[in-house]
Amino acid sequence: MFDKILIANRGEIACRVIKTARKMGIKTVAVYSDADCNALHVAMADEAIHIGPSPAAQSYIVIDRIMAAVRDSGAQAVHPGYGFLSENRNFAAALEAAGVVFIGPPSTAIEAMGDKITSKKIAQDAGVSTVPGHMGLIGDADQAVTISRRIGYPVMIKASAGGGGKGMRIAWTDDEVREGFQSSRNEAAASFGDDRIFIEKFVTQPRHIEIQVLADRHGNCVYLNERECSIQRRNQKVIEEAPSPFLDAATRQAMGEQACALARAVGYVSAGTVEFIVDGNRNFYFLEMNTRLQVEHPVTELITGIDLVEQMIRVAAGQALPFRQDYIRIHGWAMESRLYAEDPYRRFLPSTGRLTRYRPPVEGQTDRGGIVRNDTGVFEGGEISMFYDPMIAKLCTWGPTRDAAIEEMRLALDTFEVEGIGHNLPFVAAVMDHPRFVAGDITTAFIAEEYPDGFKGATLPEAELRRVAAAAAAMNRVSEIRISRISGTMDNHSRKVGNDWVVSLDGHAYAVTVSADPTGSTVSFADGTAMRVKSDWKPGQPLARLSVDGAPLVIKVDHVPMGYRMRLRGADLRVFVRTPRAAQLATLMLEKAPPDTSKYLLCPMPGLLVRLAVSEGDEVQEGQTLATVEAMKMENNLKAEKSGVVRKLCAAAGSSLKVDDVILEFE
């Protein structure tokens, strides 16, 4: 076994590998760029080596810099994590040539499977079902249009060396092919140094289901069941689960056996994932093979009890797998929510900045018999950089059933405190309550179909609003009693806290009476119903853990005049608790109108203005691309919301922009 390994990556995956290496008694070496000098993975590792400037192209994906760090540290092996150099055959070959073990597959397997065009041909030869498409290289947009017409719309434009949603577009028309081809090419070149593009048929109403495989150097290969990854946005996975609620045992076995057949065909060793598109009739088609550890591997670990990183390390050290296919079982259900630094209220655009508050839920077994796990690479006070992937954490839960795993996730998300940046926590919380998701009726089009205008916040059912109202009334009583006891308050000895209140939230107003006793409060509604509220919450605490009629309720709380801002289950509520007289007067108050910004194109995220597609005096039409902003390695085309004439350009290509910076002004 190795004494020391270097982790050629950063963030949560570097921290994840360090945890297993530490458990195995192996020392670890971290590498870091300028932006990551204070990163969590640097603090966790036994050693850390600086490898260059902040941009990944000048540090994390420069093979010579990583190889120098390997030599300087004396590491015997390298774990590449995912992304960066994890599927770079030249990196694996350089390590092999230097006598350093690559904790992953042979460079020949990476080469074969890393090119999506080659991999599809190999898959066909291995008897794996594949999607119709054009496997040759595509030279320009005109050729892309010709090919797309022949295949039949819709089509998927993909980077041959791509992954993680980079360099990928769905096109339904000739114009979308032309625009998507160029954007995919640009992203592919920036992310992978390879701008080759191919096109395949886009299967409508598809599910994205992948098979985890594990192979050793002794001829053994097993599949560790499947992961459902259909909840995606812009081809980037957001929520994953294991197993899939859609597969039956026969389809699972067929997919697993084909995945292993493909792995054997390329002499695969280590952990890898074979991704499939599955239609409504459970017909499945090979998409690609990821020759590395997947982001979503924790859900497989939770249902199998197998530490994939440990097995990767042991296989790399020459050990045989300690189990065969008949050992693999499905134990319970697991969910994973990817928490990204992106603002769901601004169409999920990237967000950067300092984490002023970062308090994840407690990991381990819960009071309900479930499990919470949080893989992260950040900490409170740390920075979310514009240079790297926007992932904050991977929150995972396990339960004996799918419903139990979802409920554990709901409570864990409500408990997770993240402040200082925009993040998608409210969105994934809302998905957990969506009827289609709860029923398992999902496809890769779920987000586009259910949130076509973006995410505006969840709307809670009235039964849940009444629970929140009861909680707010009980919490308000605690606050009022505290105020009455503050030393120095005028006439504080004679001030009494009333029992009658009006709780207003989300268009509803509930007249309630609060009766308190040493163990909690009973909140009675005007219709005669009552709810029992128990909590140890104190004013000023940002998280309230309550029990309402015996069921748990977790709310993020901020105090506002005459009430609270309360966040839970994807909803962001202004909750006002007033006396009956104050509630009556509040109905007479006017609301302040927001400022009119319709004459401006504002930058929706921090990023680099890559190009301006218009000039002063140009007439533009609704839906026309006006500018392109690059943030976190992704290009974002900003389009006109209505027809108009460009009066003035307020920024130039190459400018670094902040949120709401003016790019151009309309007449």
Image (cartoon, helix red, strand yellow):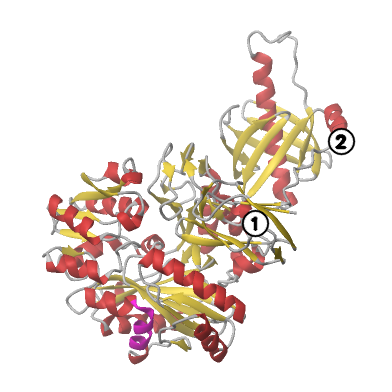
Q: Relative to the observer, which residue lies in front, 206 or 468?
A: 206
What span is in magenta? 115-123
Query: What secondary structure is found at the residue carrying circle 1?
Result: loop
Which residue lies at the image location 69% right of the left edge and 27% below the top edge? 477
Query: Could you tell me how many numbered marks the image carries?
Result: 2
- In which quadrant is the C terminus drawn? bottom right
- In which quadrant is the N terminus drawn? bottom left
Q: Which mark is residue 455?
A: 1
Which residue lies at the image location 31% right of the left edge and 42% below the top edge? 37
Which percent across, then down, holds residue 465?
72, 46
Q: Which mark is residue 351?
A: none
Whether residue 439 is visible: no
Which percent across, then down, holds residue 537?
58, 31
Write down the residue under mark 2: 587
Front disc: 1 or 2: 1
Whether residue 650 is visible: yes
Q: Relative to the observer, which residue lies in front, 605 or 355?
A: 605
- Which quarter of the picture shows residue 192? bottom left
- Name the N-terminal-most of marks 1 and 2: 1
10 Å neighbourhood of mark 1: few (<14), some, or many (≥20)? many
Q: Is residue 612 left or right of residue 163?
A: right
User: Please, is residue 109 above or below residue 611 in the view?
Assistant: below
Query: What secondary structure is found at the residue carrying circle 2?
Result: loop
Which percent across, then down, holds residue 374?
41, 50
Q: Amino acid at mark 2?
A: Thr
Give the residue furthest to the front: 617
Which percent across, then down, holds residue 577?
75, 32
**Dominant secondary structure of the magenta stretch?**
helix
- Which quarter of the picture shows residue 164? bottom left
Q: Is residue 377 left or right of residue 638?
A: left
Q: Amino acid at mark 1?
A: Phe
